[in-house]
Amino acid sequence: MTTTTTTTPTPSRMRPLVALANAEYLQFRRNRTLMFMGTVFPIAIPLLPYVIGRRTGGSTPELAATALEMVAYITVVFVQYYSVLSMITTRRGEGVLKRLRTGEAADWQIKTAPAVPGALLTFAGAAVVAAVVYSTGAPAPVNVLAMVLGLAGGVVVFTLLALLTAAYTKNAEAAQITSLPVIALATAGLGSLRAVFPDNIAQVLDWTPFAAVSDLVAIGALGRPLSAPDADAVGFAASFGELGRPVATLVVWTVLTLVVVQRSFRWDDRG
Amino acid sequence: MIEARGLRRVYGEGATAYEAVRGIDLDVTEGEVFALLGTNGAGKTSTFDLLEGLASPTAGEVAVFGLDPVRDRRQIRPRVGTMLQSGGLPAELTVTETLEMWRGTCSNPTTVEDVLERVRLTDRADVRVAALSGGEQRRVDLACALLGQPKLLFLDEPTTGLDPESRRGTWQLLADLKSAGVTMVLTTHYLDEAEALADRVAIMHRGEIVVCGTLREIVDSQPARITFDHPGLALPPLRGAEVDAGARVTISTHDLQGHLSELLGWADDLRLQLSGLEARAASLESVFLRIAEGDRTSATTAVPMGATA
């Protein structure tokens, strides 16, 4: 067979992603459950213990770090991971993924678009909680960059974990079950929980994705991980030396999940 | 424009493996409308998936615009419009939002207003897709396929669920596209649709193309049939005459007029009234039904598989 070379108009590379993400946002906005989970839930849950704790012990750095860790946990696990998993399985069941693949959007754009509303709400929710925390007397954070890095890394890894989970999730209802291992693993990565685990288990959990997010957020807010209550808090410059393991953890998980997603992702329920 | 050789598609592995497409060959030339017909489960949609690059063949080769539809997807897509068999539209978006989304993915799009007018859905622009009838959803799907101003259209059952008026409207739209030089590959369960639109037709059965050719070639290759109740006398010596258990005589012939004249002459000579006399030329429907009933032998001998116009 012959091969011909042709030129076709080249639109902006990001234009399809913007169009798809906008459509995803419109659908997200019309889903009341997702909107509640994406707005009220991640702001109210972290602020409630913060307000109560502040009344009794004042705005300590630990209290601020715990509130910010909680907002990171709720947003990357429930707003990002769970909503992307739910949206991907629903779109696949409706044939939308296969239909979009017949068009000009690249595969990565079709997979990424459902992650955009959750990612925006993650950063918006974190910004609101941080604004409340730091405007009500909490000491200034040690390293804001570490906090942003933790949140951004969490969004990326948990989006990939959602795409991976979708490969063995039949529909949105089944996602309630298939999501449990990732949710459990993320919960075990909370700093306060790792602090009470035996050392050998805690050391393994340190290498899980949410533990890395938690550590980056806590180092940024407090100067030490919440899982190490006895450690000395470090300053801005020294905090960069503490970022190695959590950043490496996020990089390793990103690469691993990316490879598995590339091989296992299903565009169509038919297979 | 499309060349396929020895295409195979197998789902699953081992004991549960299912071969949906079994080594088909086909060619679609520029500007023609090619209809792929077949019974349910014949392999039409699986064949479409291979031609569109949505799946890689288990074996064989396919080229669209001379390119590999899977590997060269980015180069092919701007010139192709696709309408899948069902679904594929986000239920919670309005018609306009759906088309705006799709338009945003096209490199050379026409306007949303243009395609809405062409599929006659302008008055439904602000209605959510979930609230549309099945036929209207098909028309939105067609509008998406047209947004990128394609040179090649894949249409998987484009008029399923449409009322007769909408079907005619869609036929006219497709005829206009053909006049504008757009090549089309379509599947349909409506034989009259294939007759009205297609330059060439292929009929699939159990993963294989059983017949392929122009409508005239296919119909001419099949015998006409003359049937009547047995009169109880010795029949004239007409070739191809058979009598079934219900004493019904069937004559299969490629010379309908000659055989019918001979039969009527014989009956006139004997002053005989042939009760239940029917004479039917072959039709696409009769060919299709014979294939569907598994009468492959008579069908395949007439027009070779993979024949081109």
Image: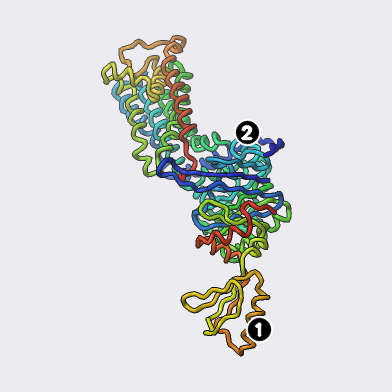
Asked if both marks, 2 and 1, belong to the same chain, the answer given is no
The percent position of residue A206, horizontal first and vertical second, equals 36, 19
Residue at x-position 44% and y-position 21%: A252
Q: Mark 1 and mark 2 in contact (Cβ < 8 Å)?
A: no
Q: Which residue is mark 1?
A: B265
Q: Which residue is mark 2?
A: A13
Q: Nearer the viewer, mark 2 or mark 1?
A: 1
- The local crowd at label 2, few if under 14, some if 14 to 19, many if 20 or more residues have their Cα within 10 Å, is few
Chain name for mark 1: B
The percent position of residue B147, horizontal first and vertical second, equals 64, 48
Number of residue marks: 2
Q: Tag 2, which secondary structure?
A: loop
Q: Tag on residue B237?
A: none
Left or right of A61, for residue B250? right
Q: What residue type is disc 2 on? A: Arg
Q: Which of the pair A182/A80 is nearer the observer? A: A182
Q: What residue type is disc 1 on? A: Gly
The percent position of residue A220, horizontal first and vertical second, equals 43, 18
The residue positioned farthest toward the bottom in the image shown: B271
Q: Is residue B101 at all visible to an observer of this figure?
A: no
Say above or below: B233 vs A139: below
Left or right of B195, for residue B245? left
- On the image, which quarter does residue A248 sit in? top left
The residue positioned farthest toward the right in the image shown: B180
- On the image, which quarter does residue B179 sit in? bottom right
